[in-house]
Amino acid sequence: EMNLSKTDNSNLTVQDYRGYGTDKTWKVSAQLSQFAPQSGDTTKTIDATLNANFGQASGTTGISSQGAQTVFESTGTNATNGVGTKTAALSANGTNLTIAQTSRQYLQAANYTGTVTWTLTNTAN
């Protein structure tokens, strides 16, 4: 497990100005790619989970390569969805990267890179 330090404003912001009405809800999901070494045996990728604390009541969200995970969504009644800005602030407290037990045998001295894919979805109530 590696704790991550926050070095900038890491906010997730959704601006929704579709107007008042029904079915104006949305969600943001995230999926983490496998981490690939930049040198050495580049075929030995690593599965990991980014445990991200977005300051939500639900606590830390685990983002991994195992499937998209909802990390942020609209709240409230239909009358308030679809108008305004909603922001979730990523907190350094409780945010870390955990390497999967099954991948630890592939670790090597190298720099690794991975990608988080964010998806914003319109969802019906």
Image (tube, rainbow, N blue to C red):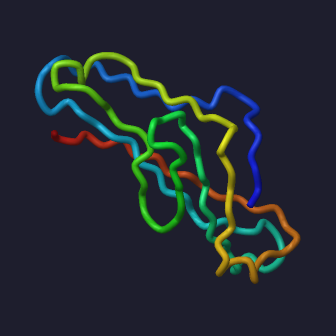
Q: Nearer the viewer, residue 32 or 77?
A: 77
When asked about the image quadrant of residue 114, the answer is: bottom right
Please, is residue 89 above or below residue 19 in the view?
below
Count all numbered tags in the image, as a single digit.
0
Tell me the quadrant of the picture where the N terminus can be found.
bottom right
Q: Residue furthest left?
A: 22
Residue depicted at 85% across the width and 67% down the height = 110
Residue 1 is left or right of residue 39, and the answer is left
Residue drawn at (56%, 62%), measured in percent from left and top?
33
User: Which residue is found at the position 67% from the left and 74% from the top?
Assistant: 45
Up-down relation of residue 19 to residue 92 (above or below): above
Q: Identify the image quadrant of residue 28.
A: top left
List the single residue furthest toward the right: 109
Q: Is residue 62 above or below residue 82?
A: below
- Would you say 13 lies left or right of 110 here? left
Residue 48 locus on image (x, y percent): 63, 65
Asked if 108 appears above or below 23 in the picture, the reply is below
Where does residue 29 sit, x and y in percent of width and height? Answer: 41, 48
Residue 50: x %, y % from top left: 61, 55
Query: Quick one: quadrant of the C terminus?
Result: top left
Say left or right for 91 vs 110. left
Q: Nearer the viewer, residue 112 or 66?
A: 66
Q: Residue at x 56, y 29 (%)?
A: 89
The answer to which image quadrant residue 23 occupies is: top left
Q: Position of residue 92 (x, y in %)?
A: 69, 38
Residue 110 appears left or right of 89: right
